[in-house]
Amino acid sequence: MKKLHYSLWALLLLSTNLFGQDFQYYIYERYYKHHESMRSTPYGDLQIYLQGPMIERAIKKNLKSNAIKCKAGISSKYIFSIQPQVFYNPSSTTLHGEFNVKIFTSKNFLQDSHLIKAERQGRINQKANFYINEIYDKLIIKLSKEILNKLPKNNGNINGDFCTIIETNQPNENNKKRDYKRPIQA
């Protein structure tokens, strides 16, 4: 009876490790609550959008690996956080997009940080949301091909509780410049 009991526990433990999530993604709350804006021309109409839902849609559409939104109590091999930046230059009619991606591992420390860039040539005019979604799709595909697929698969698990720490643990720019002394104003 004990052998059966132990073998069932071993199978349960093995199945949770095999079917665990590969990645959890974290998008900062400010990208869900605060709207971003851009103009298609210097004096054109203001295009307003929320980045958080657009990035989530791009992740669900384009990320082929096993990825879910970061939640407490769920374990995965890696957690990556995304900080997006989109800029349209009406003079050169180029839409620039970048993701600052930070990858955290099982020991709850930052393994790596990457800056991924993509751009699209052409006017955005009335279809700004469509083109922003297109940029996010390109960025997620680049993230998957260049970074996530190259990470080792035999990493230990990290708990989703760590995501609450990511939001509050933003480094202060002044801490990086401890020896900096302000110039004396004449």
Image (cartoon, rainbow, N blue to C red):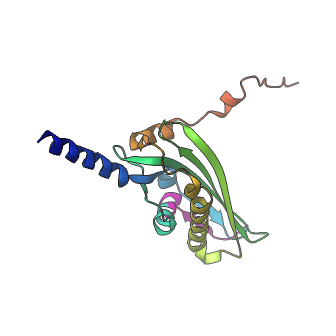
Vertical position of residue 154 compared to residue 98: above or below:
above
Q: Which quarter of the image is occupied by the C terminus?
A: top right
Identify which residue is drawn at 53% across, 36% down.
109
Vertical position of residue 127 compared to residue 87: above or below:
below
Could you say which quadrant of the image residue 99 lies in? bottom right
Q: Is residue 159 magenta?
A: no
- Does any portion of residue 55 appear in the rendered image? yes
Residue 158 in the image: x percent, y percent? Answer: 43, 42
Front-lying residue, 121 or 36? 121
Identify which residue is drawn at 69% across, 67% down.
119
Q: Is residue 50 magenta?
A: yes
Query: Total marks drawn?
Result: 0
Identify which residue is drawn at 59% across, 55% down.
150
Along the horizontal axis of the image, is 8 left or right of 184? left
Q: Give the range drawn in magenta.
A: 43-55
Along the horizontal axis of the image, is 168 left or right of 73? right
Residue 39 in the image: x percent, y percent? Answer: 66, 66
Q: Which quarter of the image is occupied by the N terminus?
A: top left
Residue 159 in the image: x percent, y percent? Answer: 40, 41
Front-lying residue, 46 or 178? 178
Residue 55 in the image: x percent, y percent? Answer: 51, 61
